[in-house]
Amino acid sequence: QSALTQPPSASGSPGQSVTISCTGTSSDVGSSNYVSWYQQHPGKAPKLMIYEVRKRPSGVPDRFSGSKSGNTASLTVSGLQAEDEADYYCSSYAGSNNLMFGGGTKLTVL
Amino acid sequence: QVQLQESGPGLVKPSETLSLTCTVSGYSISNGYYWGWVRQPPGKGLEWIGSIYYSGSTYYNPSLKSRVSISVDTSRNQFSLTLTSLTAADTAVYYCSRGGSTPMVVVYWGQGTLVTVSS
């Protein structure tokens, strides 16, 4: 099985919006409502930011939003802030009780 | 607030077996949810290892299934990972985790423990 495809890097200036994509297949992202996004700062454990495509856990700013179209899920960060600089990973149910992660995207706030 | 803490050896020899334990505080495993493991090789991405329901049902990454076992001890509020036939490719930070009503999301993460496979 191959990891979900994410761009290695993304960037934006403070206050701008940036969107990170996560591309899979019709067997995972395309057919699953269990798409999640995680934020990971250097040396820290990941943190759940979005689950079930577009739901935000309590405490996650509404600047973070998720969506999905076909086999591609997206995470949009609006009103970029310095603390948003981190690695972001998507995940999706991949069938047969299997969970798959994307390769990760390093978000840089310019 | 649920907290998870991994424990186990930091260095294991090739071909040997890794055993890690996750101690849960702030929540009783017996009350439900899925509990599992995710690993991250140094400088690389995340890899799901598997999950267990509090009742004992298990789900494993197909690529690791032949070498992995996850068990739960509700009396100690712990769950454990066993990974056999280790190679250098198994060197990673191992995170224990709590899922939701499905094992397909990781809601809470432990701080992680680095396991190095080397002779």
Image (cartoon, coloured by chain):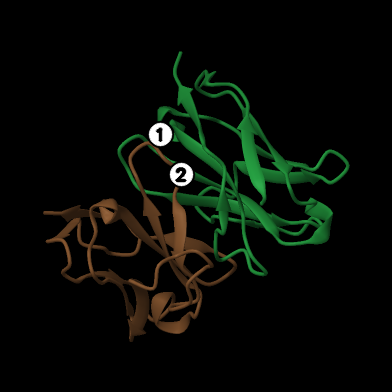
Q: Select label 1 or label 2 by which is in front.
A: 2
Q: Is residue B107 left or right of residue A41?
A: right
Q: Amino acid at mark 1?
A: Ala
Chain with green colouring: B
Quarter placement of the N terminus of chain A: bottom left
- Residue lying at the far top of the rendered structure: B119
Left or right: residue B42 compared with residue B116: left
Q: Is residue A2 visible?
A: no
Mark 2 surroundings: few (<14), some (14-19) or many (≥20) residues within 10 A: some
In the rendered structure, the colour chosen for chain A is brown
x%, y% of residue B37?
A: 58, 47
Q: Is residue A79 above or below residue B110?
A: below
- Residue drawn at point x = 59 percent, y = 52 percent: B50
Q: How many marks?
A: 2
Residue on which disc 1 sits: B89
Query: What chain does badge 2 belong to?
Result: A
- Amino acid bearing label 2: Ala
Q: Which element is circle 1 on?
A: helix
Near-viewer residue (A51 or A77): A77
Residue at the limit of the structure toward the bottom, as seen here = A70
**Residue that badge 2 annotates:** A45
